[in-house]
Image (tube, rainbow, N blue to C red):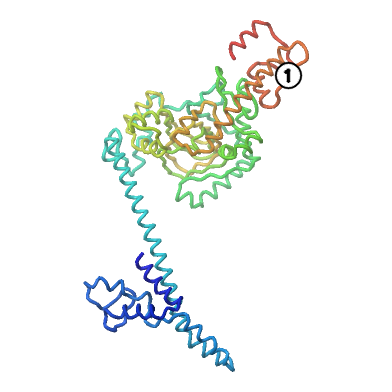
Amino acid sequence: MNLVERRQSWLLAVRDSDEEALSEKINQALAPSEGVKVKDGATVTDSKDLSALSRAGPCCGWENLKPITHLENYAPKFKTCTSQEDISQKIEAIAPVKKLIGVLMSSCKTAVNDLGGARKKHQQQKEKAKEKAMKEAAAKKWGHPSGGAGGHKRSKNLLAHPLLDADAQCWQSPDAQIQSSPKLQGIWDPSLPFIVSNFDGPFKDDALTTRLAEFGALFKQSNYRVTEGRAHAPLAESLAAALPSFLYNCLPSEQKISPHTISTSAEGPTRTLAKLEADDAASHPDLSKMMIASSFGIASSHVSIGKFELNQFPCLRATWKGTRFITIVLFEDALMNCQEIEKETPVSLQKLMDWAHRLSPSDISKLVAKGGAFAGTIGPSDLLYTPAGAIVSHKVLGDDVIGVRMGVLGGTMDFDKLLEVTPANKALSQASTLLAKKRGSNREAMVKARALRDSPGEPPAAASGADAEEAQAQTGAAPGAQGKKEGDKEEERGDT
């Protein structure tokens, strides 16, 4: 800061044509070396003369600096010029003075930039020291100075981590295997991961496979493959519809409510939205962006520990090519265990990831026993469903993994806990608002559908669109259906 102020004081003396101040500064700079020329900070004074730096000149050639009026005084001389040669001579005469002033201005600018850089570096050092202190404090809180929880040290060799070791004893229990089925059938639990094998229907679309092949070729040459190990790109609207459409067509009739909504429970109003209607997408942009189907690629031999799906939403990933070993730790189990160790709330995503890195084989065995951790191998034509907020780790086996992913909106999502961990998550906030709105409109549609079914005379105004379809699926009523027996009515009212 002193250097900036000193150089600026020289520049002000030149600019304001303060010859007295400028002469004083030049004399002070020359004084310590008894007339020997001194460059900025470089003097021939004794090394113990700490005041020499404060008296040093601001730039190279400072001893010949002239005030700005020196240039102004040349203006009348140009009027006496009778030829281009005279003008050139006048310009050459003032060139050294102009050059020195330019050097001084550049020197001042350099000092300001150096000051900004020094401050930025100092701030970075402070943040780094703070981060180190936080990590050390966290390590003490965990009770493992080496950084491990349960005795497992966070190793640079990720392949040795139990979350990626398919042969580890903790994953050999039948309870640890991700539930799987050769086809999408029956009622599935959206709070648990599952795999559907032989899910190759979307990949029979030539346009989609051509696009995935192009994406795979681009991914192979991409910098993201080297720096990040993974990438994704949104699909065109016509291609993005392939996955949710095929998913809907594969469902049994009892799970079909509307092309946008899937029933996932036989006992309650549990819904999974695979697609947003146009009005909902426009009014919930962050949520809509999260649910857009996209192609994804993961580099060969890539490993990842303790990551989340986009915005912590449930996700469907259909693999076209490649194989990977994957482990999933459920959100609620991870949150509960992390809170017990941290002894504080709310727990951040970073703390959850750190907790996952510190898991030992015995920790994982306990999670498996409680139904909180699962493992499986995902290959071509496999569809993987990942629940909301789940912590995902994987190890790619062989070539690049290429496929299609799609975020979904599940009715069983615990928005309070998810937003507590990520309060700034706009997509979660919009999803919470939308589902609350959907639940209200569904109840209204059910009432109208029952009135339509039970009315002996003219039917009242009925609901339309997805709400009416869902109400009919709930009540079993078809358009224009009349009332049933009184006993049936009472039974259905009890279910409601």
Percent from the top left, x then y, of residue 444? 65, 21
Answer few, some or many: residues within 10 Å of disc 1's Cα (few below 14, many 20 plus, some between 14 and 19): few
Q: Nearer the viewer, residue 407 or 434?
A: 434
Residue at the farthest bottom position:
82
Task: Using residue 420 as the reference point, say whether residue 124 is left or right of it.
Answer: left
Q: Residue at x 38, y 29 (%)?
A: 171
Task: Using residue 101 as the reference point, say whether residue 466 is left or right of it.
Answer: right
In the picture of the structure, the residue carrying the numbered disc 1 is 479
Q: Amino acid at mark 1?
A: Pro
Q: Secondary structure at mark 1?
A: loop
Q: Quadrant of the C terminus?
A: top right
Q: Residue at x 61, y 44 (%)?
A: 210
Rendered view: 299 above or below 152: below
Percent from the top left, x then y, of residue 268? 55, 19
Q: Nearer the viewer, residue 383 or 20?
A: 20
Q: Nearer the viewer, residue 357 or 194?
A: 357
Q: Residue at x 74, y 18 (%)?
A: 460
Residue 479 quadrant: top right
Residue 450 quadrant: top right
Percent from the top left, x then y, of residue 208? 62, 41
Rendered view: 320 above or below 43: above
Percent from the top left, x then y, of residue 245? 63, 32
